Amino acid sequence: MASHIVGYPRMGPKRELKFALESFWDGKSSAEDLEKVATDLRASIWKQMADAGIKYIPSNTFSYYDQVLDTTAMLGAVPDRYSWTGGEINLSTYFSMARGNATVPAMEMTKWFDTNYHFIVPELAPSTKFSYSSHKAINEYKEAKALGVDTVPVLVGPVSYLLLSKAAKGVEKSFSPLSLLSSILPVYKEVIAELKAAGASWIQFDEPTLVKDLESHHLSAFSAAYSELESALSGLNVLVETYFADVPADSYKTLTSLSSVTAYGFDLERGTKTLELVKSGFPAGKYLFAGVVDGRNIWADDLAASLATLQSLEAVVGKDKLVISTSCSLMHTAVDLVNETKLDDEIKSWLAFAAQKVVEVNALAKALAGQKDEAYFSANAAALASRRSSPRVTNEEVQKAATALKGSDHRRATTVSARLDAQQKKLNLPILPTTTIGSFPQTVELRRVRREYKAKKISEEEYTNAIKEEISKVVKIQEELDIDVLVHGEPERNDMVEYFGEQLSGFTFTANGWVQSYGSRCVKPPIIYGDVSRPNPMTVFWSKMAQSMTARPMKGMLTGPVTILNWSFVRNDQPRFETCYQIALAIKKEVEDLEAGGIQVIQIDEAALREGLPLRKSEHAFYLDWAVHSFRITNCGVQDTTQIHTHMCYSNFNDIHSPRIPSKEEIADRVNKMLAVLDTNILWVNPDCGLKTRKYAEVKPALTNMVEAAKQIRAEL
Ligand code: GLN
Ligand code: ZN
């Protein structure tokens, strides 16, 4: 019984790659230094998997930036603006595509399916020429082999590559990247031939787009691609790996009838219908790579449950054709629990990060082969039982309150226009009121104050005074700018989710539980392990203090339940929506305390609401229903005179956090365009996101122009 890992985190247990990359980009270390860190990381990852007993160990899942960009490099599909003249793509061209350089901007980046990872979007045109220009896959295969590890080289599959690409500027309307299929396959053939010659016996093509809603011409492209590659692939075992959901039934049919493919990888964690699909028919003689161990979460697997699932699959596909795997690449989870020295033993026993998941996969494979490690399985069962019964997980009161929510739609009792009138009477704002989204520039000094307070190096009093001073500075600036509804600037917050998570019960935090977001950027999501409640007010102290400094309305600033949920590792022992309702109830209490504290405008940010949209359209309605419901819960109880705002960001974050200072004319033009379709009494004028990543030198002139633009239009109306 064999085991397989779809892919592994690249950053290293202590973000070694991040620091090596950033030091290289800053010119503080050489390419050799960077390569050394990368080589060491790869070696330790391969060794770790080999030691654990994994049979199919992936290579080429390491990357200096992104696996899709690596594929672009492999194909030589470098956009003209990087002035690449051919030959093996070097680090300078590679990082210019990823990050831009002094003269040319970076390629676009976008979300990788429904994860928090972002990839570099290939830009293709009918004129794009392809040539084999990065030998990374073969180099890594050989590198592992030299270490005594025979790996499964992983490539982004040709069809997913094209379906994830965009048409270059100028050809958007007339051209579909998929039409280039026959032009990229020759490069794939060269890569395959080299891997074969070097001794590879397996190859893995990641084709995750197969889990999305596809049209019949997309499916024809899969059939065409893998039949075109058939002779190149002969003699190799070919795994097509899918993940993040189940494959829709018609796609499953197409996929399982590809004759050049010998193995299929399916996600059994998020792919809720995968089991049914496989049972409804699986091609004889082919391998099933069963992704039972969750690659996107941090919980220890329920080994007994997985074993039962695997046994039922074994009956369908045959003992020697079942391979135990992860649901997707482990790059979407934290790296190694060993480095969590601050988590208590009980919580730790409930968790498994990438390194621990590798061991789980192998333990399942051995158990299926009749060599069950009884001690390991009973420790797992005990940990699961302790998690189920722990009083730290269950809070009866919260459970009751969440259950009581059912049945009501939590809409406000009065109409929007009645509330707008009541609010206008109280707030007395001009038309096109101006405001900002919450945060003001975060200085090095501010970060130092927060850090030192956390480390108990400065007293509570010193900390409070420093934050108070910052708030008063921000209030003054806004009054000088003549902004109508002020914010306190969020100087006390490191992060819009962590700040709340740290004050809510049911949350815990890791020291090194980093997950790559893009390039060298990592996030450290909080872990929601128990029923969520709010023991104490979280923002009222600062908001009241800020309101006391000004006669203008001070906006209360909260993160909404859906965003807190989507940016955390979420418990897997109850549906996501139930956890979300619990967070909503906690935020509701905060909203009510802010209102009681005299705050008249409250903004509840839902920057990540769109991120949670399921991959398949058929599931959107259900998600949106509970997500919107959760938001409504937070504020359905306020008085008509309390004004509720939200901020949802742009779903494409490339457009925000830019240093560009728009002119008064440009802003006025935008506002006028909006006034053409919106009523004057509902339109506000504000920046597109918080200002914490910006500098005052950008913020002050931009806000000055914004306020002037609003005033000019008011005068014209
Ligand atoms: N209120 C938050 C801020 O201003 C919103 C951030 C966000 O949308 N990402 O920083
Ligand atoms: Zn935003």
Image (cartoon, rainbow, N blue to C red):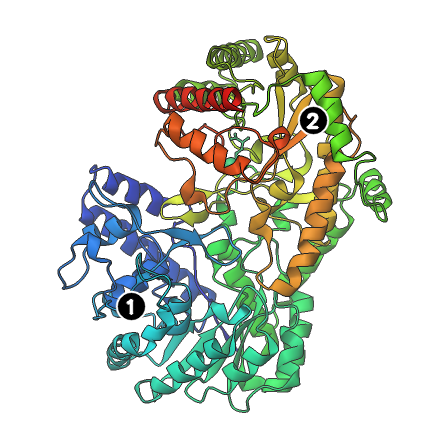
Camera-nearest residue between 655 and 322: 655
Horizontal and vertical percent for residue 428? 66, 16
Crowd class of label 2 (few under 14; some 14 to 19; many from 20; radius 10 Å):
many
- Look at the numbered disc 2 and say if its residue's Cβ is closer than 8 Å to ligand 1: no
The quadrant of the picture occupied by the C terminus is: top right
- Mark 2 belongs to which amino acid? Gln
Above or below, 277 against 425 in this view is: below
Residue found at x 40% / y 48%: 518
Camera-nearest residue between 386 and 297: 297
Camera-nearest residue between 524 and 252: 252
- Mark 1 belongs to which amino acid? Ala
The part of the image, by quadrant, that contains residue 278 is: bottom right
- Kind of element beneath mark 2: strand
- Look at the numbered disc 1 and say if its residue's Cβ is closer than 8 Å to ligand 1: no
- Kind of element beneath mark 1: helix
Q: Can residue 187 be seen in this view?
A: yes
Location of mark 1 (residue): 137
Location of mark 2 (residue): 643
Horizontal and vertical percent for residue 450? 49, 21
Q: In this view, does 694 lie to the left or right of 88?
A: right
The part of the image, by quadrant, that contains residue 546 is: top right
Horizontal and vertical percent for residue 559? 61, 34
Q: Is residue 368 left or right of residue 685?
A: right
Which mark is nearer the camera, 2 or 1?
2
In primary-sequence order, the first of circles 2 and 1 is 1
Q: Is residue 532 visible?
A: no
